[in-house]
Image (tube, grey):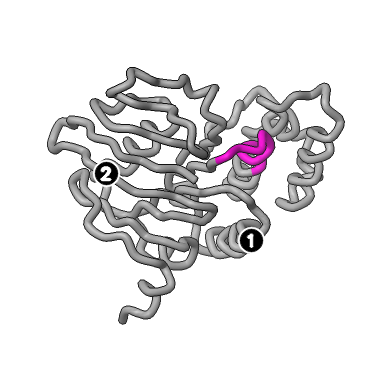
Amino acid sequence: MINVEIKKNLFYFDLDVNFDLNKEVLVLKGPSGSGKTTVLNCIAGLDKPDSGIIRIDDEIVYSSRNKIDYPARDRNISYVFQNFALFPHMTVFENILFGVDKRKREDLDYVRKLMDIFGISHLKDRKSNCISGGEKQRTALARALATKPHILLMDEPFSSLDVKIKSTLYDEFLELKNSLDIGVILVTHDPHEAKVLGDRIVNIKEGSCIYDISARKSRLVK
């Protein structure tokens, strides 16, 4: 479980959000520039709130009052960026192995299992700059899960893909999330994507949470 209560002064408005996350997919939805990515970066330890507290599995990783601020590497969080952030000089297999303890046989076996799940085993020796957008997305997801994180953060990971590839990846993600024992926070400005992929939807506008409802309830709203 994660609890987020943070405030941060941004250029056009003050970010002020408060939400909890269990082992579910929580979607942060809202227009561009509303503060969604800043929330992810603060959770990941890539940005620092001005005040507040962030708890992950009952452990405080950030607290302005207690002057606690864990570095990103110590938060056990994986992040799938909008541009995938793959290493172009590495193969698909090397990208997924990045951050994994290569001395452990079970970790290597898990990486191979993820490659099978995402259907990219045949690409293992291909450089990441020589594969398609959909294949890059699958590689980025496999790399994010390979370290067995407590939380998976995803910043508009499907936005650069065409409709057909998106639909296929939505199906794969929905199938995969049922077997994940972690919390997922997905950022999007696409209402359809939010309803299809999310268990809960938190709408953010100018840095504030406007509403927090179940995605199922949202689907019933005409």
Q: Secondary structure at mark 1?
A: loop
2 is within the stretch colored magenta: no
- Vertical position of residue 206 compared to residue 53: above or below: below
Residue at figure coordinates x 70%, y 31% from the top left? 127
Residue at figure coordinates x 60%, y 37% from the top left? 149
Q: Which contiguous range is marked in magenta?
A: 142-150
Quadrant for residue 13, please give it: top left
Question: Which disc, if any, is residue 17?
Answer: 2
> Depth check: 8 or 121 in front?
8
Residue at figure coordinates x 38%, y 27% from the top left? 62
Question: Which disc, if any, is residue 94?
Answer: none
Residue at figure coordinates x 66%, y 25% from the top left? 99
> Depth check: 164 or 216 in front?
216
Asked if the residues shown at circle 2 and circle 1 are in contact, with their CB atoms under 8 angstroms apart, the answer is no
The residue under label 1 is 178
- The quadrant of the picture occupied by the C terminus is bottom left
Quadrant for residue 52, please give it: top left
Q: Position of residue 77 (x, y in %)?
A: 53, 34
Q: Position of residue 96 (x, y in %)?
A: 69, 33
147 is within the stretch colored magenta: yes
Q: Position of residue 70 (x, y in %)?
A: 45, 21
